[in-house]
Amino acid sequence: PVIIATVDDVTPVGLSEYSPTESVKNTITDVLSILGNEALRQPGRCEERRQQIEQVIRQRVNVLQMAQRALGSPWTRLNDAERLEFVSLFVELIRDTVANKIDQYYDEQVFYLVEQREGSFAQVRTNLIGPKVDTSVDFRLENQSGEWLVYDVVIDGTSIVRNYRTQFGRIIRDNAYAGLVEKMKQRALTVKRFEKTAPAIALLPTDTSDSR
């Protein structure tokens, strides 16, 4: 399993509120617990595994804000039903991406470097270090009613939200919004169909040139 090494002490907060660092650490721990559960790796339990990861994401990530930021201006032209559909598809996309990435780095160490706060926003900087990787991963969070929820993750300087916004924009330009939804639906089906044989299936290749 991943070894958690904390460099800076967590800033004390109210008893009912986790700090941003604690929130990130709990999220990673919960996902790793699911990925490391041998029972959930058994045939026939793939769907249960996906659903448990999705539950963690919906609890610890501001999925509405993240989906809205990732889609950009087309969000304003969607009706309520379309927004709900997009958020659901976006959560599936994030779920599978998170599961694949963390699964790849399961045996690496996570170092919590520093926590920065500005009002209701915070950033937790971490490093993933091991034989196969030396990667910076920064979590951006917003405090909502005492809970620190993730709304973006920056990997080696590349914002996931900005990256998806670039990808979504290209697809919408070529195929309209309906084409984007169709691609996301087809991707979800592909992941379910080939989950055991394909280690990572992306909507489009990662665009590392578009960082914050």
Image: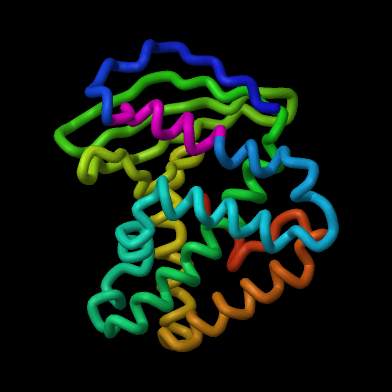
The span picked out in magenta is 17-29
Residue 210 visible? The answer is no
Based on the picture, tell me whether residue 19 belongs to the magenta stretch: yes
Disc tally is 0
> Which residue does the image show at 69% across and 63% down from the upper left?
47
Residue 131 on image: x %, y %: 74, 24
> Which residue does the image show at 43% across and 19% down from the upper left?
113
Report the side of 35 relative to 87 (left or right). right
Residue 105 on image: x %, y %: 68, 36
Q: Is residue 176 above or below residue 31?
A: below
Q: Is residue 15 above or below residue 150?
A: above
> Which residue does the image show at 40% across and 27% down from the upper left?
22
Depth check, front residue: 135 or 198: 198
Farthest left residue in view: 119
Residue 172 on image: x %, y %: 43, 81
Residue 80 visible? The answer is yes
Q: How is the image coloured?
A: rainbow
Q: Is residue 106 above or below residue 158?
A: above
Q: Is residue 32 above or below residue 182?
A: above
Based on the picture, tell me whether residue 183 belongs to the magenta stretch: no
Report the side of 45 relative to 183 (left or right). right
Residue 77 on image: x %, y %: 25, 83
Q: Quadrant of residue 71?
A: bottom left
Q: Quarter holding the N terminus?
A: top right
Please name the predominant secondary structure of the magenta segment in the image. helix
> Which residue does the image show at 20% across and 44% down from the upper left?
145
Q: Quadrant of residue 50?
A: bottom right
Depth check, front residue: 39 or 110: 39
Q: Quadrant of residue 107?
A: top right
